[in-house]
Image (cartoon, rainbow, N blue to C red):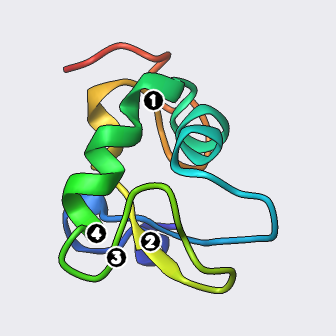
Amino acid sequence: ASGDVPKARRATYRVAANDSLVSIAREVLNDGDRWREIWELNKDRLKSPDVVPVGFELKLPESGSDSGASGNANGGRAP
């Protein structure tokens, strides 16, 4: 399983139809208010936080802040 974790645990998310930064933050980070973190990581490649093209691969914040991008590996607690 050690090969499953990318360097610095940087996760990505491929945008689906009807996704928004808030819905992605809610689904993946378990906190819709963290959409700004996703925007900060991707604003150099997106024109607006309100328009995220389907199929776009978003960089996600490191999972340690709140919860894991692929689950709640740390019990939701920050280190």
Give me the C-alpha separation between circle 1 and circle 2: 17 Å
Indicate whether 12 appears above or below 36.
Answer: below
Residue at disc 2, secondary structure: strand
Disc 2: which residue: 58
Indicate whether 51 appears above or below 33.
Answer: below
Are dots 4 and 3 in contact, CB under 8 Å?
A: yes
Give me the C-alpha separation between circle 4 and circle 3: 6 Å
The residue type indicated by label 2 comes to Leu
Disc 1: which residue: 67
Indicate whether 9 appears above or below 17.
Answer: above
Question: Residue at 53% of width from left, 27% of height from top?
Answer: 32
Q: Position of residue 78 (x, y in %)?
A: 26, 18
- Residue 76 is marked as none
- Total labels drawn: 4
Disc 3: which residue: 46
Snapshot quadrant of residue 40: bottom left
Give me the C-alpha separation between circle 3 and circle 1: 25 Å
Give me the C-alpha separation between circle 2 and circle 3: 10 Å
N-terminal-most mark, 2 or 3: 3
Q: Position of residue 47 (x, y in %)?
A: 33, 75
N-terminal-most mark, 1 or 4: 4
Disc 4: which residue: 42
Are dots 2 and 4 in contact, CB under 8 Å?
A: yes
